[in-house]
Image: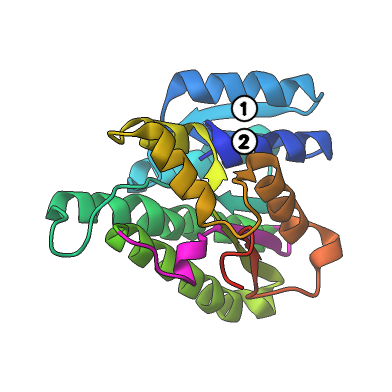
Amino acid sequence: GAGVGIGRAAAVQFGKEGAKVAINSLTPANGQETLKLVKKTGAPAIYIQGDVSLTADAKRMVDETVKAFGRIDILVNNAGIVLPGRVDNMSEEDWDKTIAVNLKGVFLVSKYTIPEMRKVGGGVIVHNASVVAIKGVKDRGAYTASKGGVWALTKAMAADYLSENIRVNSVCPGTTYTPSLERRIQAFADPEKARKDFIARQPLGRLGKDEEIAAAILFAASDEAGFMNGANIAIDGGMTI
């Protein structure tokens, strides 16, 4: 999930820190652009097109990464979609798609990555959840359920793989300005009112920046966070105060 926004910013920051970066995006144009940006940092990088909610694609992402770089030390599960709706008015199709990408995708990519981490004696997994996993917001029933599941899965995986030196943590961003958010804003009848409403729910009085969330992801994956496991970093502009 590194085609745009937080995922792209994280990929670039990992590149700047000297990582070899495998970039996934469902949309080739976005993935190729991220690949260019990461390569500008001097880091070796590859792009792998694929849908994290599909078993074959998830496995291929892992296989191609290992083929290119020989190992996997860090996995960032960032891919996600936001479809609006309450339980009473959301279509079953939108519910299933949200859970498939946001939660099943985390399961599938982790499933095929963990055996590779075992081979090298451990690793770090960082899930991008959301502030809605902690604080409910209106008109986001499936999204909230999916991200709450990611937060809970973080703790389950941290417990399961602790003895294998695989740490699992999550970040919970607040409302962050990304291309995805801008598309949602423009879909409102009054985009400027929608923009103000999104900002108003952040006690800091502004939207988050994708590079700020990326910095939290980078920290969670770093050796400096070696004593952190099964934890969550809420980087949410004060929404959960």
Residue 135 in the magenta stretch? The answer is yes
Nearest the eye: 140 or 9: 140
Q: Name the residue that disc number 1 marks.
A: 46
Q: What label sits on residue 22 in the rendered view?
A: 2
Q: Please give left or right for residue 112 compared with residue 118 in the image.
A: left
Q: Which residues are magenta?
A: 120-138
Q: Is residue 44 left or right of 94 when viewed as pictured?
A: right
As shown in the figure, which amino acid type bears the numbered disc 2?
Ala
Which sits in the foreground, 192 or 232? Answer: 192
Residue 126: which quarter of the image? bottom right
Q: Is residue 123 visible?
A: yes
Tell me, yes or no, whether the highlighted magenta stretch contains residue 110: no
Q: Quadrant of the C terminus?
A: bottom right
As measured in the structure, the alpha-carbon distance from the residue carrying label 2 to the one carrying label 1 is 5 Å
Q: Residue at x 13, y 64 (%)?
A: 88
Q: How is the image coloured?
A: rainbow
Residue under the image location 31 percent in, 36 percent down: 188
Query: Which of the 4 image quarters holds residue 168?
Result: bottom right
Q: Residue at x 43, y 47 (%)?
A: 80
177 over 96 or under it: above or below: above
Could you say where residue 179 lies in the image, as x and y percent from the top left? 49, 31
In the rendering, at what x and y percent does residue 30 appear?
50, 23
* Horizontal and vertical percent position of residue 123: 70, 60
Q: Is residue 172 above or below residue 218?
A: below
Contact between marks 2 and 1 (CB within 8 A): the answer is: yes
